[in-house]
Amino acid sequence: KEDQSLVESEKPKETFADVGGLEEVKKKIRMNFIMPLKQPEVFAAYGKQAGGSLLLFGPPGCGKTFLARAVAGEINANFFHVELQSILSMYSGQSEHNLHDIFEKARESKPCVLFIDEIDALGGSRHQMRQHHDRMLVNQLLLELDGLQAENDNVFVIGATNTPWYLDSALRRPGRFNHLVFVPPPEESERQTILELKLSGKPLGTLNLSKIAAETKLYSGADLEQLVKDAVESAMERTFEKGEIQPITQDDLKRSAKGRKATTLDW
Ligand code: ATP
């Protein structure tokens, strides 16, 4: 049966400008996904196909989902977010059916970005029964990806995983997830950019963000976002005490940084 709740599309407002750093990754995505839509004649002239699929991997919180949303935002496309776990069913054939429905819906909503998270759920299980189920679902996914490739459909599939080593190797052959892109923890200058992005538009004191960036080695984008939220909370508390808007200070940020750990350390 049609399950509406399996996947809902939205139109993200984020663009690449909201994603701090990751210039190499953005460049690769621009060449493969964005330029073919904007200048199809150039790609046609070289006999190059638009679209295809891309697999992002790396530690949690470093912007895989955010980036995929921004791709949709860049090309004003619909965005579907599918967690692979959520379509798995214990009933024979139902997971494949669910996957097919999602691709079908994506095809009806093109141009669109179909983001498939936790794609590693398709591997790594050692249990005999699950292995058989996994294989059927991998085959279905291959079928769907090949179908898109043939139709040149403006459905852009972005897969993501924290554990690429579990990924079924059949998924990495040409025409499938053959673009494997590492989304690393932000470097110092990227951390500064992310801090600037997350603080922008807020009341700020005199800040030395390069100092905070230097002191937050291996923090993910999500860690930095949380750090800013903590600092905002401190400034708001002061605001309520004093009865007028208080700026976020270097001290707020420093204290918040001390209170948070770099989560990519565990990856
Ligand atoms: P997971 O593997 O856990 O799904 P992820 O790599 O998909 O993680 P995101 O969900 O994209 O991580 O990131 C979490 C939040 O961190 C985002 O909503 C965003 O606000 C912030 N963030 C991460 N990286 C960046 C970045 N490079 N620029 C700006 N914000 C970022």
Image (cartoon, grey):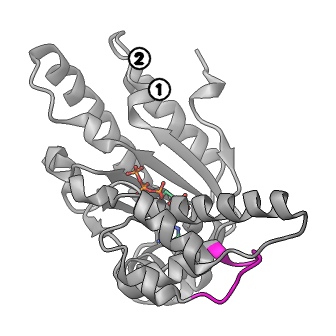
Q: Which residues are magenta?
A: 199-207
Residue 213 in the image: above or below residue 223: below
> SS of the residue at dot 2?
helix
Q: Please give the residue where the numbered disc 1 appears in the rendered image.
A: 98
Q: At which x and y percent is residue 148?
A: 44, 53
Q: Quadrant of the C terminus?
A: bottom left
Q: Please give the residue where the numbered disc 2 appears in the rendered image.
A: 94
Q: Residue at x 45, y 37 (%)?
A: 83
As shown in the figure, which amino acid type bears the numbered disc 2? Gln
Q: Residue at x 63, y 26 (%)?
A: 5
Residue 109 falls left or right of residue 193: right
As shown in the figure, which amino acid type bears the numbered disc 1? Asn
Q: Are marks 2 and 1 in contact (CB under 8 Å)?
A: yes
Can see residue 58?
Answer: no
Tell me the number on the disc at residue 247: none
Residue 186 in the image: above or below residue 141: below
Residue 175 in the image: above or below residue 74: above
Q: At which x and y percent is residue 155?
A: 53, 57
- List the single residue furthest toward the right: 243
- Disc 2 residue lies near ligand 1 with CB under 8 A: no
Q: At which x and y percent is residue 107?
A: 58, 47
Nearest the viewer among 28 and 52 is: 28
The secondary structure that most of the magenta stretch takes on is: loop
* Magenta run includes residue 202: yes
Residue 45 in the image: above or below residue 196: below
Q: Residue at x 41, y 64 (%)?
A: 258
